[in-house]
Amino acid sequence: MALRSALVNVMAGAARKAARTLVRDFGEVEQLQVSRKGPAGFAAAADGRAERILLAELASARPRYGALSEKSGEVRGEDTSNRWIVASLGGRLNFLHGIPHFCLGIALQRDGDIFVGVTYDPLRDEMFWAEKGVGAYLNNSRLRVSARERLETAVLATDVHPRGRPDRRDSVAELSAMTPKTAGIRRLGSAALDLAYVAAGRLDGFWQKELRPWDLASGIALVREAGGLVGETGGGDDMMNTGDIVAANDRLFDAIGETLRDAGREER
């Protein structure tokens, strides 16, 4: 049985507390699908409530730490070495449409490095957590990335940017290049959960561009501590700033990156 540190306990407790209101609000979404106003404003309010709870719980436990989140932005702390990175609703479009696949994510960034990550799926009560040097876990079970060695047997996940986005053509080109080389591509709608699933071996790899730090942070910790690799599709290591990420085991990582780079060259 894994022994969770005080930091992980703080983060898991905050996620569980915020999740209670998020799950309650999710139960109301189906009722709003038929209303004239629709659920969009309701989902935004639910997201905001969850974020406030997360930030308040984390600040209560570590009042000197800074924080970064989607709605509140950057909150600088007295302790400049430590910063929370918070995703109060990873998979918001799923939530908005009543699809039961979303999560909360918290990471602790220490001296620029992702030190601890927690991703919580409240509907399945799955708490993914990782701490640098300790390993990655699902509740109390140790996680390892998959051992598949060939792309043709691998299942990957990504997303395609919506119509009107300037980078849509790139994501469509990448999907077209990757699909015939794999056993299947999934679009599950939550980057944070996709990364957790890579850490758990449920997915063999994940790639996407134009993500935000809160979409990535907890998942980066999980994949690394589960024995996987993370990097940019172009081969760099600045995912948190570029929003460009590939995650997979060490047998598939290079092949995925090469396929994506080839797709990019052909598109240009």
Image: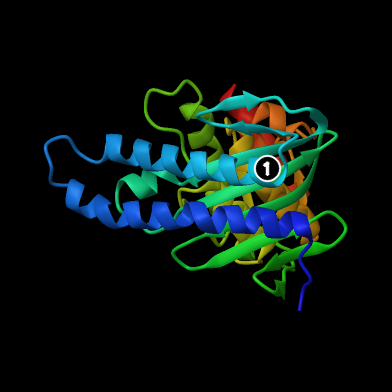
- At label 1, counting other C-alpha atoms closer than 10 Å, the crowd grade (few under 14, some 14-19, many 20 or more) is many
- State the image coordinates of residue 2 (x, y, percent, origin top left): 77, 73
Q: Nearer the viewer, residue 75 or 152?
A: 75
- State the image coordinates of residue 169 (x, y, percent, origin top left): 48, 28
Looking at the image, is 212 positioned above or below residue 226? above
- State the image coordinates of residue 205 (x, y, percent, origin top left): 65, 54
Looking at the image, is 221 positioned above or below residue 80? below
Q: Say whether residue 152 is left or right of residue 100.
A: right
Name which residue lies at 36% across and 49% down: 95
Number of numbered labels in the structure image? 1
One can see residue 176 in this view: no
One can see residue 217 in this view: yes
Name which residue lies at 69% across and 34% down: 261
Residue sticking out furthest to the bottom = 1
> In the structure shown, which secondary structural element does the residue marked by tag 1 occupy?
helix
- The three-letter code of the residue at mark 1 reads Ala
Q: The N terminus lies in which quarter of the figure?
A: bottom right
Q: Nearer the viewer, residue 32 or 244?
A: 32
- The residue that mark 1 highlights is 217
Q: Nearer the viewer, residue 209 or 200?
A: 200
The figure's colour scheme reads: rainbow
- State the image coordinates of residue 60 (x, y, percent, origin top left): 65, 44
Q: Nearer the viewer, residue 218 or 58?
A: 58
**Rendered image quadrant of residue 58:** top right
Name which residue lies at 50% across and 48% down: 190
Q: The C terminus lies in which quarter of the figure?
A: top right
Residue sticking out furthest to the right = 133
Name which residue lies at 59% across and 34% down: 209
